[in-house]
Image (spheres, rainbow, N blue to C red):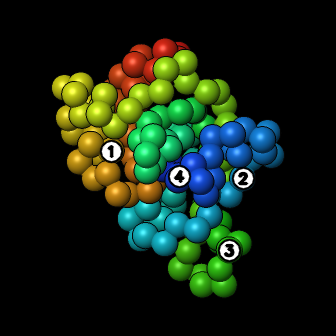
Amino acid sequence: MQYWLFKSEPSTWSWDDQVAKGDTGEEWDGVRNYQARNNMRLMKLGDRGFFYHSQSEKAVVGLVEVIAESHPDSTTDDARWECVDIKAVAPVATPVTLQMCKEDPRLAEMSLVKNTRLSVQPVTEAEWRAVCEMAGVAP
């Protein structure tokens, strides 16, 4: 299993929006960055991810699961852009902020800390476990 982080502006697509989709989940569409798209191409069914609210909150607020592998993004006719589908798994007990990640030495090399702008990022297993611990959820 691989681990990921999905960033969204809560005013555009929030954790509550994701939860409302239930087990059918939703496309992680609209991504127009090659590196983020390439990350989605690597995802497999059952991979887990953090749902991260960007902008003012800047925090991991939930856990998600990849339920459909990379496929054409339905929001464009441009064949370059692909996406995956994800579903909400569980909220975190304690949101984990970007500042908390920056202050934890275990996360010094985390993509979120080093490249805060990338919307879909890989997360190592050690980072996954550390953030889950901070969030009060089982890894």
Label 2 packing within 10 angstroms: few (<14), some (14-19), many (20+): many
Whether tag 1 and tag 2 are in contact, CB under 8 A, the answer is no
* Foreground: disc 3 or disc 4: 4
Q: Residues within 10 Å of mark 1 (few under 14, many from 20)?
A: many
Seen from the viewer's position, the closer of residues 62 and 82 is: 62
Say whether disc 3 or disc 2 marks the residue closer to the N-terminus. 2
> Is residue 116 positioned above or below 132 on the image?
below
Q: Are the residues at dot 3 and dot 4 in contact (C-beta closer than 8 Å)?
A: no
Query: Disc 3 to disc 1, how far (Cα)?
Result: 26 Å
The image quarter containing residue 15 is: top right
Name the mark on residue 8. 4
- Indicate the secondary structure of the residue bearing disc 3: loop
- SS state under label 4: strand
For badge 2, the amino acid type reads Glu
Which mark is first along the chain, 1 or 4? 4
Whichever of callouts 4 and 2 sits on the residue coming sooner in the sequence is 4
Q: Label 1: which residue? A: 112
Kindly report the distance in space between the C-alpha atoms of the residues bearing marks 4 and 1: 13 Å
Q: Secondary structure at mark 2?
A: strand
Task: Tell me if label 4 and label 1 are in contact, CB under 8 Å.
Answer: no
Residue tagged 3: 75
Query: Label 1 to label 2, Cα distance in Å?
Result: 23 Å
Give the residue displayed 24% in from the left and 34% down from the top.
102
Say which amino acid is labelled 1: Leu
In the rendered structure, find residue 26 and report the number of the disc placed on it. 2
Q: Is mark 4 in CB contact (under 8 Å) with mark 2?
A: no
Of the residues shown, which amino acid type is indicated by label 3?
Thr
Dot placed on the residue nearer the N-terminal end, 3 or 1:
3
**Cα separation between marks 4 and 2:** 13 Å
Percent across and percent down for residue 116 are 32, 51
Look at the numbered discs 3 and 2 and tell me whether their residues touch, using CB distance below 8 Å. Answer: no
